[in-house]
Every structure is written in structure tokens, then in C-alpha cells.
Amino acid sequence: MRFKLVQRTLATAVLMACGLSAFAGDLVINTDASDPAPKAAFEALVKGFEKANPDVKVKVNTFDHEGYKTSIRNFLGAEAPDLATWYAGNRMAPFVNAGLFEDVSDLWAKEGLNDSFKSAAASMTINGKKWGLPYTYYQWGVYYRKDIFAKLKIAEPKSWDDLVKASATLKANSIVPFAIGTKATWTTGGWFDYLNMRVNGYEFHMDLTAGKVPYTDKRVQAVFDKWDDLVKPGYYLANHPSYQWQEALPAFVKGDAAMYLMGNFAVAPMKEAGLKEEQLGFMQFPEITKGVPKAEDAPTDTLHIPSKAKNKVDARRFLAYMAKPEVQSEMNATLGQLPVNKNAKMPQDTYLKAGFSMLSNAYALGQFYDRDAPAEMAKAGMDGFQEYMLKPQNRTAILERLETVRQRVYK
């Protein structure tokens, strides 16, 4: 415990020193882009900005992910850098509500970002104002076995009824409709997100994850009514609590399961396990409630100007540079993810290309259940979703328990 205390004290001292070094003409950026690809992308971004703006010298302080999460509130409130990385949606709300992030609505208006970043606009807006700029995201959706669908003459599902019928056909042919591993329960969050956004819409989902709606609300019950269509007939991989998401992949690769709701990061291991593009399809999660605009899960990384930043003028110049379509294209080619600017260059990869088109036209973007809800609520929620997938008869007790947690977490 004492060692951890010393670590935190040193980390805070380093961060304060980093902030103290800032003055006009210098730009200090704190980031958690410590993995190789994000680090390389940020280095190239800074190099390009300095070349285009030779009067500004950028200093980047890179921290590991967990250390960054525990330190950000301290450095935003004490000696803030000029820019800091974070996440969109409800995840940025505590810093916005505490007055720690700068309103950058002026930049969005001046640079035309309300159009070029339209799909991400809602997730960057709180109280009608914009609080940062997104620079990368990736899509979620349903990856499916095109060869199995073709063999059984199943068309790509466009509606919930289509999806349920396809699942029935697959099961009748001894193929599990959906692969999933819920040993780490976060995978259940993707299912709840999509069901709630398709049944009740993006605004309701954001209100629920912001603690404004009881989990016992009849509209939440309606989500589970639809989930029953897949859970009760046994359309998910048996023993899914025994598997991590990667451990559920072999069933999908071998053709024992035919669909997998997952983020695009799963494509690489699917291909490495032997699946070819002619076998692997991608589709948008189908419509449930007719007319509800389609929002998508797209965890989005963002850059913000702290309210206490010393060099806000150059920080705005940096954000304007990072918003350019060619800069977003180059950065995300390194990251292997998607540029948020809809005018950026279309990726060549088959699945990134599909994701770019889908997200660029999305109504709005969810950040994923464990980003949109506070940590304690998210854990209780995902534990409850896993229990429901095993014992749907416990639904009422699960939702009442989640409501108790909601009342404690958001008070």
C-alpha cells in the first residue's frame, strides 16, 4: 500500500512539473497513447503539426493507461497541460460538469465540424456545447459466416424478425446462432447496448446509462422481452461463462457457430485462425423498433483542452489541424482504426471500409456500456446481463437489484 502511495505521489509530482513547463509558444499534451501503434500515430501527428506550425513546440507526456486514469483528475485540477486525451459520451461528463474541460463549440462552428464529424457530434455534446474533438474510433456489428448462410439459403437479416428466423434455421441445422464468451462480462454490454438503442433509441440509452431512468422502467423491460427471443430458445453458445471472448472464437471459425456480435478488433484473430474474406461477412445490427434512428457502438478516443490550460490559442490550432481529413486518414492508417471525419480517405480493408460507411452515416454513437455508465453501475449491470443470459427467469430480481445499485451510484 505504501509503495502504491509513493508511486501516486511521484506520478502527481511529474504531472505537475509537466504542466509547469507550459508557456505561450509551447504546447503540452498529456496522453495515455502508450501502446506502439497509438504512440507512433501521436508522434507522426505532432511532427506534422510542428511542420505546419513552426512557431509552436509540442511536448508530449505519455502515461500508461491505468496510471492516466487515476491521475487525470489531479492534473486537470492542479497544473493542467494544454491538451489531454480522454473519451467521448458520458465518460467525459464528470470533467465537463466539474468545469475541468474547455467549451470548444466555437472551434466546431469555425471549422465546419458539425457536418464533417456529424455522427460523433452527439457524443461530444453536453448541455448543448462541444467539449473536445474525436480522433479515432472503431465499429461494432455482427460478423457472420457467409458460407454457412449461403449453404442454408439464409439472407442477411435486415430486421429483428429476420434475425430470429435466421437463428431458428441455424439451430435446426445444429449450428449455434451466436458465439459469445462471457467469462469477462463486458461482452454482454454490447448486446444490451444494441438491444436498448434499437428498441428505445440513443437518447433513452444515454439517459439510462447517465442514471436518469430506473432499471425497472417498462422500457427496460421491453429490451429484455426482445432479448428473450434469443436467450430462451438457446441461441447463444452453451457454457459461455466459461469462455473469454477469444476462447469462443474457435466455435465460430470451425462453423459450429455462425454469428458473433463484436468489435472490429476481432477480425485479425478470426483471419489468423483461418477464415477467408469470402467466408467472413459483416452486417449492421438490424432494426427492432421501426423508425428508431440507428445509433452504433463506436468507442471513441478524444482530445480536450483543460479549462486551466495555459496555451489555449495553440491548443485550438492543434485541434483544428487534427480535424483535417488527411490528418485523420494518416493517423488512423497507423492505428488500424477509423477516422471520425467523414471526408477522410476511405480505408481499403474490407471490414474497415464497411465500418467507415456505417459510422459516417450513424445517427449517433454509443461508447459501450462500461464507458457510458460509471464503473460500479457498469460492473453490476454486466454481471446482471450475464446472469440473465443463463437464467432468464431471474430477470425481475436482476433488474430490481440493478435499480438498487443505480440509486446508490448516482445519488
Image (cartoon, rainbow, N blue to C red):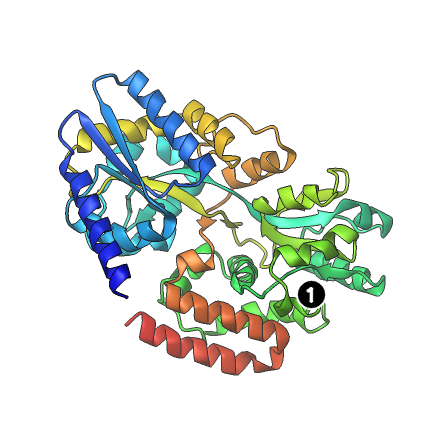
Q: Is residue 88 visible?
A: no
Image quadrant where one finds the N terminus: bottom left
Say which of 278 and 12 sits in front. Answer: 12
Q: Is residue 79 left or right of residue 280?
A: left
> x, y (%) of residue 102?
22, 42
Query: Where is residue 132, by image quadrant?
Result: top left
Check disc 1: other Cα within 10 Å, few if <14, some if 14-19, many if 20+.
many
Vertical placement of residue 302 versus 389, above or below: above
Q: Is residue 244 left or right of residue 65?
A: right
Q: Residue at x 13, y 30 (%)?
A: 23
Vertical placement of residue 140 versus 111, above or below: below
Q: Residue at x 24, y 64 (%)?
A: 2
Query: Where is residue 347, by image quadrant?
Result: top right
Q: Residue at x 21, y 51 (%)?
A: 10
Amino acid found under the numbered disc labelled 1: Tyr
Say which of 68 and 202 sits in front. Answer: 68
> x, y (%) of residue 375?
38, 64
Say which of 328 and 269 sits in front. Answer: 269
Badge 1 marks a residue whose secondary structure is loop
Residue marked by disc 1: 236
> x, y (%) of residue 237?
70, 65
Image quadrant where one finds the C terminus: bottom left
Vertical placement of residue 385 versus 117, above or below: below
Q: Is residue 19 visible?
A: yes
Q: Is residue 89 left or right of residue 355?
A: left
Q: Most extreme residue toward the front, as rendered?
A: 3
Query: Where is residue 6, by image quadrant?
Result: bottom left
Label tally = 1
> x, y (%) of residue 43?
37, 28
